Image: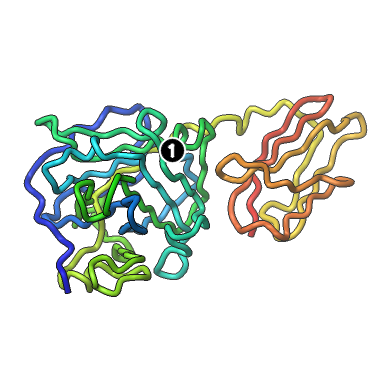
Amino acid sequence: MKKITLSLAAFALVFTAFAQDVVIERLTDNTTALITTHGDADAGVFCSDFFTLEEDVTLGSFTFPGFYSSATEIGDLLIGGDFYIYVDGGGFPDSDPTTTDALVNLTNVQLGAGLELVLDADDIESGWLVNVTAANGGTQVTLPAGDYWVSFAPYVVGDSAGGGRWNWSGSFTTETGVPPANASLLIDPDDLFGAGATDWTEISGLIGADFPSFGWTLTNEEAAGLGDNDLVGASVYPNPATNVINVDFSSNVELKSAVLFDVLGKNTGAALVNGSMNIADLAAGVYILNIETNNGSLTQKVIKQ
């Protein structure tokens, strides 16, 4: 089996200071890093890291420390960046980058439009920052409390293991000092490295060494729109809901519009008919219901079970 690890030289990433609060921090204290790169000549090699949110979080920025492994600076070969968040499917992501089924599916994110190439203290291209709101076209993404997997890979010209190869730094230490409940995974759909990891595969088994997590940081962002409602005399129930949500209005309220958005801000197409909205065919998760009336507006988080 070909080795897919590289030793990480000691360095310190210098990240931009944010006013946002740190939600998750996994320190870069493992000297092993793993390839996670999407070359346009193949299906790519992707890594994924497990995390748990104890409460709803409006995503701010993710930082991913690492390094490229050729003489060519990765910025010279960069096309964009691929960023995914998956729902936990029982110890593995519920999908993979060969599909478009990720809960958050942001591909080919451009520099200056949600993607930033981070330099270390010696001005060497070493890490990435993804501003989720900017990458999602300016629409915030709010995840409910739960278990998830995050995956990132630069999208580059050529082979994934070629001049644009990038390696994500490992971590032994989380902010709480407790390793994640599920160890890090890798998928190599085209089996470029001959390890047979064409489905999500635990990295520890691939490299024959403990690899509990990658280094990365998540900050939050203040949610916009929720809690600033001026519509009185309306109620939304049940919430959480399984098949149908109901909206009751006072007799003096005239409905103008009702739109249910998913976490990426896309209209689900669900219609409010006679005070009821059928959500049976929607995936479980968090949605935002926006109602406009002659008596004000209402923006309500709705949870589909």
The correct choice, above or below, for 184 with respect to 263 in the image is below
Q: Position of residue 85 (x, y in %)?
A: 44, 52
- Residue at the right extreme of this rendering: 251
Q: Residue at x 67, y 56 (%)?
A: 282
Q: How many marks?
A: 1
The correct choice, above or below, for 118 with respect to 246 in the image is above
Q: Which residue is mark 1?
A: 132
Q: Residue at x 27, y 34 (%)?
A: 117
Type of the residue with mark 1 = Val
Mark 1 neighbour density, 10 Å: few (under 14) some (14–19) many (20 or more): many
Q: Position of residue 128 (x, y in %)?
A: 28, 39
Q: Position of residue 73 (x, y in %)?
A: 17, 38
Q: Is residue 168 left or right of residue 3?
A: right
- Residue at the left extreme of this rendering: 9
Look at the image and tell me in which quarter the C terminus lies: bottom right
Q: Position of residue 30 (x, y in %)?
A: 14, 55
Look at the image and tell me in which quarter the N terminus lies: bottom left
The correct choice, above or below, for 36 with respect to 114 in the image is below
Q: Is residue 281 left or right of residue 199?
A: right
Q: Quadrant of residue 132?
A: top left
Q: Is residue 103 left or right of residue 156?
A: right
Q: Residue at x 36, y 40 (%)?
A: 80
Q: Between residue 19 and residue 87, name the one nearer to us.
A: 87
Q: Between residue 4 and residue 205, name the one nearer to us.
A: 4
Q: Residue at x 23, y 67 (%)?
A: 193
Identify the colour scheme used.
rainbow
Q: Quadrant of residue 214?
A: bottom left
Label 1 element class: helix
